[in-house]
Amino acid sequence: MPATSSCTPTCGTTALSTPVPGPAGQSAFTLTVTAITVPAAALGPVIAANGGNIEIGNSDWLAIGATIFISDGTNVGHFEVVTIPDSTHVTLLWLDQTGDSVSATVIAAGAKLVASGAQVGIDDPLLIANGGTGQITAALARAAILESAPLAIAEGGTAGATKAAALTALGIGQSPTVDNKTGIAYDITAAAAQITGVSAAVPTTGVYLILAHVTVLYTGVTFAASRTLTIKVRNITSAADLVTTTRATNAPTTTGYISIDYVLPFYTGTLTAAHNIQLYIDLSVVESAGSSVVTDASIVLVPLAI
């Protein structure tokens, strides 16, 4: 008879495990029941007709302080959860993040409410007055600096945004005020008087350099003795003599001269706007024969510091 065999090793069975479903999780979103009007200002509370609470489908999955996003497909907004009174209500704070609908926009009821992240804020650029540029790009920064109020002279600037404005503010490089008269034919007398028509008005208060000259034509003159010719630059408005020069005539007899130019010493000082600067002239004793006549004269006001 054949031998009887047995299982080696011992025969057995394999146990099978049966999976058991866990509890259902919370939904990752809900819908609003009430419409939401975006507040008038950022970080403003969202107010609803029911006293401030917004009704939603379910609030159990939310957390106080969380950021949420609400969209009805057209109007949107980011909000912070402030309180959760019950499982169907929340109070919200509008965050006014980039892309949010503007104030007074209505996000319709039935909008989807989902969890969101907080927007990373970008600090406002440091103001120019605080040492910054007021801008976040190089091009805008350069434009802002160039277009900002120029630095005052007292602070080391020029007080002008352009070369012309800077020169004006610094009082340099400005055009002089010139009064140059020819063909005057003013007969010099023994009383100091203005050379007819020669006058320059100060344009702006400041420091000026004054230059002046007078041309005299002596025709067949006789002076019994040497006389004194006096020429003055005079501020008529303030009744002040600014420059005075004297010249001797000697004692000619019926003598004519080529025109003689008398250049006055220069003057520097502060002049006031609208003051009138004139030339005065006289002879201590006039000629006994012939004539002493001013033919040309000029006054030049050169601004040095305005």
Image (cartoon, grey):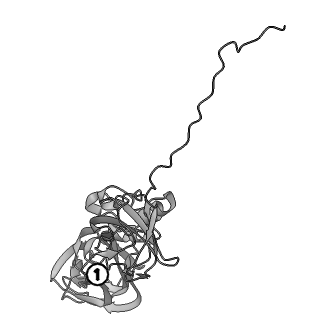
Q: Residue furthest right?
A: 1
The correct choice, above or below, for 147 with respect to 277 in the image is above
Q: Residue furthest front?
A: 1
Residue for point 51% across, 46% down: 20
The disc labelled 1 sits on which kind of residue? Answer: Val
Position in image of residue 264 (x %, y %): 30, 72
Q: Quadrant of residue 210?
A: bottom left
Tell which of 233 and 138 is nearer to you. Answer: 138
Position in image of residue 97 (x %, y %): 41, 67
The reply to whether residue 162 is visible in this rendering is: no
Position in image of residue 27 (x %, y %): 45, 61
Q: Quadrant of the C terminus?
A: bottom left
Q: Quadrant of residue 235?
A: bottom left
The correct choice, above or below, for 27 with respect to 237 in the image is above
* Circle 1 residues within 10 Å: few <14, some 14–19, many ≥20: many
How many marks the image carries: the answer is 1
Tell which of 156 and 74 is nearer to you. Answer: 74
Residue for point 25% across, 88% down: 194
Q: Quadrant of residue 222?
A: bottom left
Tell which of 102 and 67 is nearer to you. Answer: 67
Q: Is residue 239 left or right of residue 208?
A: left
Position in image of residue 55 (x %, y %): 34, 76
Q: Residue furthest left?
A: 239
Question: Which residue is disc 1 drawn over?
Answer: 202
**SS at mark 1?**
loop
Q: Quadrant of the N terminus?
A: top right
The correct choice, above or below, for 137 with respect to 33 in the image is above
The reply to whether residue 273 is visible in this rendering is: yes
